[in-house]
Amino acid sequence: MTSPWLQPDTIAVHAGREDLAALGVHALPIDLSTTNPLPDIEAGGLSYEAMASGGTPTTEGGNVYARLWNPTVARFESALARLERTEEAVAFSSGMAAMTAAVLAATAGTGRRHVLAVRPLYGGTDHLLSTGLLGTETTYCTAAGVAAALRPDTAMVVLETPANPTLDLVDIRAVVEAAQGVPVLVDNTFATPVLQNPADFGAAMVLHSATKYLGGHGDVIAGVIACGAETAAALRRVRAVTGGLLHPLGAYLLHRGLTTLPVRVRAQQAGAERVAAWLRGHPAVARVHYPSGDPLLGVQMRGPGAMIAVDLRGGFEQAKQVTGAVGLFTHAVSLGGVDSLIQHPAALTHRPVADGAKPADSIVRLSIGLEAPEDLIADLDRALAAHRPAAAHAGRA
Ligand SMILES: *Cc1c(COP(=O)(O)O)cnc(C)c1O
């Protein structure tokens, strides 16, 4: 069951469950203990010491305290690491807690505080880096500008592919080469491990807002980073000290969600391909941002995914109207769940981004769920038809 040659769909169903048979259970157990009985002072102390420095609990000393170790969370982490083909993974209370831990692990106490960020990024990430809240200094650049922007004190490079919300694909291998050994973090939230494994192309850290596709049902906030053992130890140390923990109930839901992740992502993608093709032929649509046809498809990413950005000819006014007129789509931020969402990035998810780097006001972003594509298309058709240019309104009024 742990053979490395298993297909990803099989890994999604079985990984992280290796110890269940010995426990005599079939479904994932949820361990809610905040503390654990200690065998004796010395063994407990040694296990504490091992975990506080980023390691795993000792057999003799046990898990000690849930800020240091939780078996339900650890099972989810090991499953996600298998899917991302990394040695380990470390889970956090949100995608932003994961990003914070990654930045702290790479910079705090290292003498290097410079971060290179390839725009566009998720608005929250852009905001975290631009505020300098974590004591870092950030340079924003394009993928092609990474080599020129490197400094002796550059601690990490951050990129997102597909980017949010333009759906541009970034060549991970090219950025890793340009970074000359500086660790590259790839936000893989939009692609999921089903469509892309950034570690295969040299990424040192693969971050997910697990809130999105990994959870898939809109009921868990979480983050996770898949990485090598040494980086995982540094991240666990930060997590143990700062406390950005994933609750075991969330870990249980995420681990259960992984079993259907490949099926969900492929079905959502098939729906998105239909919706994107239909949108491309609609007269109200100036441009559809969807990476079908990108040269990196089939090389780096195995399919175009289920996120679409739409540039509307009617601009902000039409964006307002469409988000208010849809019926099946929910007008809400977030993405990656079984139901379809629509939102306006410039006003919401990318609100904190500096003016010159903000997405256009005419763009709405769609997250395609598992509904029948023809029903989603009919919903968008009605919502787009509801638009009357402002002048026509004035004329009627
Ligand atoms: C939502 C999101 C995040 C932040 O994750 P939270 O779980 O909301 O903290 C980071 N990156 C991307 C691409 C996202 O969509």
Image (cartoon, rainbow, N blue to C red):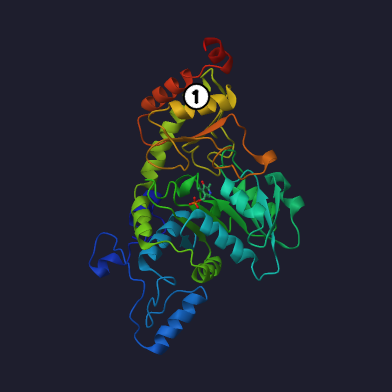
In the image, taking residue 261 as reference, residue 113 lies left or right, namely: right
Q: Badge 1 local density, few (<14 within 10 Å), some, or many (20+)?
A: many
- Extreme residue toward the top, this view: 395
Name the quadrant containing residue 28: bottom left
Residue in view at x 59 percent, y 25 percent = 315
Judging by the rendered image, the residue that carries numbered circle 1 is: 279
* Tag 1 secondary structure: helix
The yes-or-no answer for disc 1 within 8 Å of ligand 1 is: no
- Camera sees residue 397: yes
Position of residue 346 measured from the top left corner of the image (x, y, whole percent): 59, 37
In the rendered structure, which amino acid carries the disc numbered 1? Leu
Residue in view at x 44 percent, y 85 percent = 45
Q: Is 215 rendered above or below residue 107?
A: above
Name the quadrant containing residue 74: bottom left
Q: Is 375 rendered above or below residue 71?
A: above
Q: Nearer the viewer, residue 263 or 351?
A: 351
Q: Is 327 rendered above or below residue 242?
A: above
Q: Nearer the viewer, residue 17 or 396?
A: 396
Position of residue 268 measured from the top left corner of the image (x, y, whole percent): 41, 37
- Extreme residue toward the left, this view: 24
Residue in view at x 43 percent, y 57 percent = 80
Position of residue 242 measured from the top left corner of the image (x, y, whole percent): 52, 68
